[in-house]
Image: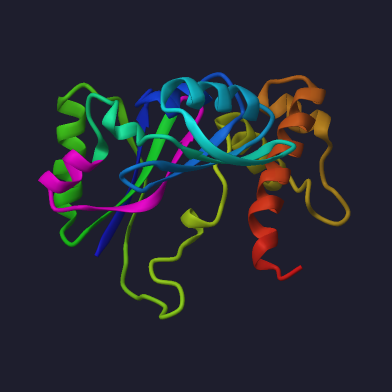
Amino acid sequence: MYEATFRIEGDGAYAAATAGTDATVELWCNDHCDLLYVTNEAVDGVRAHVRERVGIKDSLQRPNESVLVTDDCLKRHERSSIETYLARHDCLLLPPLRYADGAKSCRVLALDPANLTGCYRDLVDDGFSVSVERKREIETVAHDAPLLSLDGVLPDLSPRQRETLTTAHGKGYYEIPRETTTSEIADEVGVERRTAEEHLRRAENKLMAALMQYVGV
């Protein structure tokens, strides 16, 4: 089996809801409605966008976090859906779909890597802006966690958050004692010190929120 993660720019209303914000949306489609998990400070703006587009049947909310059940399924309102291309090339979608920075990320599974290539080419030929974020061959499956990988555990970081975090790690910011400062990290990334610190805090917060459920606390 082969897995690829496609990033599709500006694809759909949920992608549009995250554009220009730090919000992330995870989607589980149930044909008649969508289950959405929304995080970060732009939650209220995403809620308003979803309510206007497909309606909200019910929700749970706390600061910077929301679970939404929609009145209708978004794919009924879109001009096309990823499922159309997957079916054409005998591929499977591994939920959830993830939206961040105005784009949709899809984990796609195929028995033949040529099917992934064909699906990608069809999307590009139809005018979608697509990039391949990850690609791997699946050789083993754990009985208690089929197809589990860090792709399904780690949160979506914005490009700036990812760049700042990887720069900080590479320069020894997380060593004991620290081998660099946030000022040096900011210079490397090309932003102000406070901006670099904000990117680090947000990235660290996302990682902690995603991983704590597996720590057993």
Position above or below: 59 against 52: below
The residues colored magenta run 83-102
Q: Residue at x 46, y 62 (%)?
A: 149
Farthest residue, direction left = 88
Q: Quarter holding the C terminus?
A: bottom right
Q: Quadrant of residue 62?
A: top right
In the image, taking residue 177 as reference, residue 108 lies left or right, namely left
Front residue of 123/44: it is 44
Rendering coords of residue 208 (x, y %): 71, 52
Rendering coords of residue 155 (x, y %): 57, 47
Is residue 98 within the magenta segment? yes
Is residue 107 within the magenta segment? no
Q: Quarter holding the N terminus?
A: bottom left
Rendering coords of residue 159 (x, y %): 55, 31
Rendering coords of residue 140 (x, y %): 35, 76
Front residue of 37/88: it is 37
Q: Residue at x 62, y 40 (%)?
A: 66
Figure disc tally: 0
Front residue of 163/147: it is 147
